Structure formats: structure tokens, C-alpha cells
Amino acid sequence: MLSTVPRLEGVWMNSSIAVARPQRWDHPLDPTLAPQIVAWLLKEPPFCQMDVSSFASYAPLPDILKNDARLHKLATGDVLFQKGQYGGSAYLVLRGTVRMFLADALAAAGNELGTVQARPTASAQGRHWLAWFSKQTSDAKVKRPVMGLRDRGHGARVFLQDIPGILDQYQSTTANAGELFGEMAAVTRTAREFTAVAQSDCLVLEIRWQGLKLLRQSPEFRTMLDQRYRSRVLKDHLRETPLMTNVPDDDLDQVIAATRLESFGDMEWYADFRDQSQQSATDRIAREPLIADEGTYAAGLWILRGGFARLSRRQGAGHRTLAYLGKGQLFGLRELAHNWREPSEQTSLPFQESLRAIGYVDALCIPKQIVFRHILPYVAAHDLPTRINAPSYRFGQPVLDAPIDKSQSHLDTGLLEFLVEKRLMNGRAAMVIDTNRCTRCDDCVKACAATHNDTPLFERRGAQYGPWLFAQACMHCEDPVCMIGCPTGAIHREESTGLVQINSNSCIGCKACAESCPYDNIRMLETTDQRGRKQVDKQGLPILQASKCDLCQGSGGRPACQSACPHDALVRIDMSDLKGIQAWLQSKGD
């Protein structure tokens, strides 16, 4: 029954309407996936090899497949995704072969793009799976002279010509039936590192990361992921590292065999982040997991796979932050290159700085002797770090005043400490307000409200360093930990830009994203129906939905808040780009 309240003007209006509270399983990845297909998948590897009793009762294996999986029938040459795109899914090859190009083959061969041709959407294809299965996989292949990229928004594919030429021209690897690919980008919420193309007619199962996380309950599935990474993904990752561009395959195999996969900190670091903010800088650094310690033996080369790490040097009783390192950056190369050139123990250098995990870090460690034998001999002299001709100490002695790596930023130490303390280096589009220019006119807030149904999606308050106010607006983080707990994938990264978006159709108002956001930049708002009535559940509690800044995506210009500022006091900055921050500060005369 609807409750009503009178308005002051004497006009009665409905105040609320009871609706069913949305649940996690209300939003399957493919609503058209038939029960017969789920039953068939359970008979296919690796699912038939899994112990169903190892899954939680609230998320049994059949339900995971029914709700978190989607089938793709690909013709020869179809592109599943491109390098640089974002996605929250991994893919399992059931039939056929998928080839993965490390280089951006589509961009390099862009002059061969053909016309956009209409193709069935995923939901339309879903109605034909049973008919397709009845024909098995022995049907004649559909011949096409080009390969296509599906436009998910319009159900079309763009085709690129000359597949054999592309296969021969670009370095690639394959995934065959029973093999998984794309899981690293899904789990780490990062961009795809390769382009995936159907080399033959294929049947591929897409598994969104929510299901991937549940499937990891199975020891068999975890083993498959580990073997997959060691045998294929690690080689691709190392080959993409500029330092190893010219390393021969035989030597690279030796590197792969010796490389250690390490992780530091807690992937759900946001859980106690707010408590740590009350601690002193010394206590915070002491709590950060130590990856490599200044003054200790330079035993290997570190490559960051994900997360951020603090680069620091001892100063008095504390530490001075020099920079923070992110995905793809190296630690220890300068010392190893020096020691390789100067093999005498008397001139050997230990690590010149310390490296600590900020939150959570995934990293690779390549032992020193492997670097000496199989990597450095193939690196051009001009690509190695500059020589350290006069180190201030010898091996085993304290670091006093060793030279700083000139490739690092020279930002003010206080600002660096502030960015690390507040974890602001995670933001790819942080809203920074110059309070010396800001007149508190609130035109930015009004513009945001006018653009988003009279509800502003940020607050003009937040952490401040000097005149710089870091407003409480979604920063579209490099590592958006808000996505970790979302049960439906409603909060996700937009495929082409990486912007963090919320799908209002699949958000169930569980608050997981808002509680996970370390910066309190996501708010839960009460929902209304088309007549403006507040939606409540059977107990009368409001139905909520997550809301945050979307950078006014789709408006065709700058965010409304930035465009509306009459004093040029508001800017969006990529806080992971130290050189960009430095250039911006210099432009402001700071």
C-alpha cells in the first residue's frame, strides 16, 4: 500500500512505493543463457574436474556459471578485445584457437580497416545456442577475408583485412581449447596487454571477475591459473618490458624459470586505511611491507606488476620519500648495472634506496645472476642507467649521500609524503582546487547538480596541502579498489577510457563500493521511480543506489564543474604522473 503525505500547497502526492529489494543473482551476465547450456558446461573441462563440494552453499558451481558466464561464438578473424581496453572478464576457450597479439596489430594496420557490418548482439545470439550445439562443431567454417571487432554498443563488427599477413608480421601466442586468458586484466583491474583474435571458428566462455573470484575456491582452477601465468602470461609480460626487447628466446626462458612471483601487503588494504591516517609518518612507513631495504645486498631486479610502492631513503631517524613507483616500473636496475660493469666486491653497491608496498603490490623478482647472464648482455649501453662513478660508500656500509636517480621526480618532499599518506597517487583524474583562486561561489557544485538531475556528485571539501584542496570527487583510480566487492559488476571501468562508471540498472545498493572507497568519494542515494516516489523494501527501508562523479562522460567536453569555474581554480590531474604534476605546479609558479 502506498503512503501519502500532504504538501504545503495543499496538493497530495505519493511519498513512497514498496518494491522488491534487488539481489546479487538478479543481474546475470547473460540472461539468455539456457539451463541446458549450463548443464553442458559442467561436463566440459575444467568444470568437470572440479569438486563441487568445495564451493560455498550460497554460490554453487552451477549458479556461478549461470550468472557470471556468457558464451561467445566467434568466426575466424573476430576480435574479442583490443590491447589497451579495460574489461572485467577472463575468457576460457572451449572450441577452436584464439591468438593473442602483443603489439597493437589493429592500430598498426589501421589503413586496412573495412566497413562496419551488422552482427547479432550477444542476447540475440543467446537464443541460438541450442540450435548451434545440435550441429556440433563440424559445420563448415564461415569464410571471411577480414577480422572483426565487435562494437558492443551497436551489435556490429569492424573488419580488418589480410589475416595471414597480420599473423606473420606481429609477435603472438595462442590459447587453445581448455586454456584461459585475459584473467590478469580482470583481477588487477588494468588495461588489456594484448589483442585477442579468433584464429579459427571458436566457442569462448566469458567469465566476469565476480565469478572468477568464486571459481578460485577450486584448487584445480587455482592450479590452472598459476600454470597459465607461468607458461604464457609471464613470458608475454617480460617480453613487453623494454629492458628485455632484445633478449633471445632461449635466454628469456631462463629468466622465466628463475623469476619469483611475489606479493606484499593486503589486496583489501582500504579496510584499515582510515585507521592508519591517524598515525605518524614514521609509524605508517613502519607498517608498510618492505620489498627491498636500503643498504642491503642488491640481490635482484624488481618489476612492479600492480599497485604502488614508496621509494625512500633514510634521513636522520626517519625516511625521505623520493618517489612512488607504479605498474611496469623497475627497482634495482641502477645498482645491478653498476655491479655488472664493476664486478669487484670492493666496488659493489647495495640498494641505494628502500622500496615499500603502499597498500598492496604485485611484483616480479629476477635474481642478480640471471640478470647478469641473460638480460644485461643484450641491453644497449645507452639504454642502461648512467654510471655511478663515485659512490659514497662501499658494500656493507651505511648509505650517507649516494646519488639520487635522475629519472625520479623532484617534487617537494612534503608534497610527496602527503600524496603517499593520503594514497592520492592512485587518482587518474583527481579534482584539485587552488584555494588562493577559489572564491567559494559554488558555481562548480551548481554546474554538477544541473548536469546530474539536481544532485551534485562531489563535495567541495577534502584533504589539503598548502593551497591545494583535493576535493571529494571520484578520482577514477589507477587501482579502483571500489570494484573489488561489487557483486554484480555494476561499478566497472569503461572499456576504452578506463573511467570508473556505475551501471544504475545492475547496482543493488549493497554499499560495498562506498565502504571500500578509501577516499569516501561514493555516496549512497535513495532511489525514486518515474513519478518521483521514493522506493522502499517490504520493511519500509529505502532502496539505495551508489552515486559518484562520472567526469560528465558523454557531454563532449570538460567536466561541468571545471568548465563552470569562473576563476580557473579547478583542475583534474593524473596523480600517478609525477612529471605531469611537476609541470602543472611550475605553470602555477610553485
Image: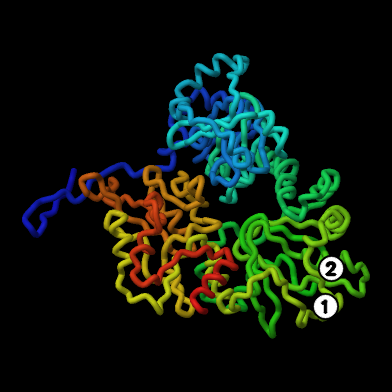
The reply to whether residue 271 is in sight is: no
Residue highlighted by disc 2 = 338
The reply to whether residue 501 is in sight is: yes
Kind of residue sitting beneath label 2: His
Q: Position of residue 319 (x, y in %)?
A: 66, 78
Quadrant hosting residue 346: bottom right
Measure the C-alpha gap from mark 2 to mark 1.
10 Å
The quadrant of the rendering that contains the N terminus is: top left
Q: What colouring does the structure picture have?
A: rainbow
Count of numbered circles in the view: 2
Q: Residue at x 43, y 37 (%)?
A: 153
Q: Secondary structure at mark 1?
A: loop
Query: Badge 1 local density, few (<14 within 10 Å), some, or many (20+)?
Result: some
Q: Residue furthest bottom?
A: 316
Residue highlighted by disc 1 = 391
Query: Badge 2 local density, few (<14 within 10 Å), some, or many (20+)?
Result: some
Q: Position of residue 128 (x, y in %)?
A: 48, 20
Q: Position of residue 84 (x, y in %)?
A: 58, 47
Q: Looking at this view, is 238 or 388 the one in front?
A: 388
Kind of residue sitting beneath label 1: Pro
Q: Is residue 255 above or below residue 54?
A: below
Cβ atoms at labels 2 and 1 below 8 Å apart: yes
Q: Secondary structure at mark 2?
A: helix
Q: Is residue 432 above or below residue 125?
A: below
User: Could you tell which of marks 2 and 1 lies nearer the N-terminus?
Assistant: 2
Q: Looking at this view, is 280 or 121 the one in front?
A: 121
Q: Position of residue 212 (x, y in %)?
A: 57, 42
Q: Residue furthest left?
A: 10
Q: Residue at x 47, y 45 (%)?
A: 489
Q: Looking at this view, is 477 or 64 the one in front?
A: 477
Q: Is residue 439 above or below residue 240?
A: below
